[in-house]
Image (spheres, helix red, strand yellow):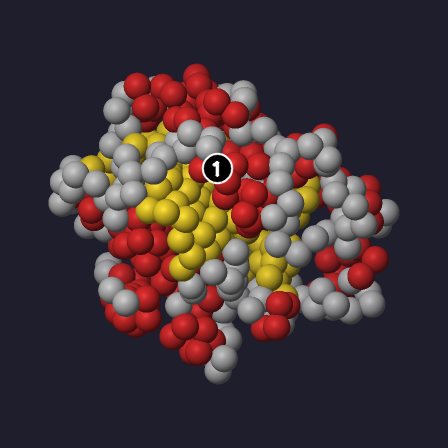
Amino acid sequence: MITVSGVGCCLVDVLYSNIDFSTKSFQPFLSKEPGDGGLCPGQLVFLEDFVRYAKIPFEEFLNSISKGQSPNKINIGGPSIVPLIHLAQLTARDECSVRFYGRGGSDGNGSYLKKAMESTAVFLKDYQLVNGYTPSTFVLSDPDFDSGHGERIFINTIGAANEFLPEYLKDDFFGSDIVVFGGTALVPSIHDQLGNLLKKSREHGAITVVNTVFDFRNEKLNPNKKWPLGESDNSYQYIDLMIIDHTEALRLSGTMNSDDACSFFMHSGISAFIITNGSKDLFAWSDGKLFLKMDLKAMPVCQEIVDVLKTNRTGDTTGCGDNFVGGVLYSVVEQFKMQKHQLDLSEAISWGVVSGGFTCFYVGGTYHETTDGDKLAKIKYYYAFYKAQVGN
């Protein structure tokens, strides 16, 4: 039995689809400079900072941009729990135990979130509801943004995630085969001690995976400085695989372009990384330790999914990155089960690409299966297309 344990961002997503970022009524709420509390496509802002920036009550803002409509969906969200749910849906339950550690609030959202997660194949190893608000994100989605590829804006409340402390992680977490730190910038105590937690995981023999989220806390504190990851840049040497999007890569590296960001991470001590960029090519690299050595390489999105989306736009892009991570984890687990001496990063990326792309066919990051294996069967269909596209 392979154990995968995750900690990080887990919240309630309140989803508003079909919000037009280009309208005159929306434009005044867009950010004018980094960290000012305004909205920026693809990025996150804290609710209290946005309200100060907007200078109107949040409910009035929501009512204005949604034209009085209710949310399209309320769902499980967050770059820690969503990848783990996707992994648990794709892998055999008797061969892989997927665990989550975190905190929710003692409000209605917390009750919903815990019940919804208990209906998935993820085991809530240490998830408790404590006093306070459950972490939540209002997700505003514009399907026409970026020439029809779509984009989202995130307005977040950290809430009870502030209450999850590093000392709550015990040996059963660190002793897992794979540990995943997901979106820890929204769980401040974990994020600020990430280096020590990664080092402890490595000392226990675990494979360490980090996937990031927009760090508005540090963006607001130091908008002109690169974001910290844990206590110092020494954190990177304890990461076996890091999955980041383009904007986060620039801010974490303190660089202005993809080439310089890639160079930073290649010299940071990371064993392997993947930098995604929405509908554009991603970049990946491996030093040859956990994964086979890979020089910096570009890989495309799945063209078959792009073509289908031209006529099938029933979903949105919420959770694409999170499910990408889950797809990569699935491939890592499957390769790990085969006891390979070195894993194939290109193969893991292939599963990530089709997993992220498939997310565009439904609303919200978490897909609720009707039967076990339902999601895997659908994704395998696109996996075959993608392998043919990139040349097996």
Q: Tell me which residue sits at (50%, 43%) in the image.
A: 262
Q: Secondary structure at mark 1?
A: helix
Q: Is residue 321 left or right of residue 336?
A: right
Q: Tell me which residue sits at (81%, 50%) in the image.
A: 32
Extreme-left residue of the structure: 338
Judge whether residue 76 can be spotted in this image. no
Q: Is residue 254 left or right of residue 368?
A: right
- Where 80 falls versus 147 (above or below)? above
Q: Tell me which residue sits at (32%, 23%) in the image.
A: 202
Q: In the image, what residue type sits under mark 1?
A: Phe
> Residue 212: x, y in percent?
50, 41
Give the quarter of the image for residue 201.
top left
Q: In the picture, which quadrant includes the N terminus? A: top left
Relative depth, front residue between 289 and 173: 289
Judge whether residue 346 can be spotted in this image. yes
Q: Which residue is under mark 1?
A: 265
Relative depth, front residue between 101 and 118: 101
- Where 145 falls versus 172 (above or below)? below
Relative depth, front residue between 360 and 235: 235
Give the quarter of the image for residue 387.
bottom left
Q: Is residue 223 left or right of residue 256?
A: right
- Where 64 falls versus 45 (above or below)? below
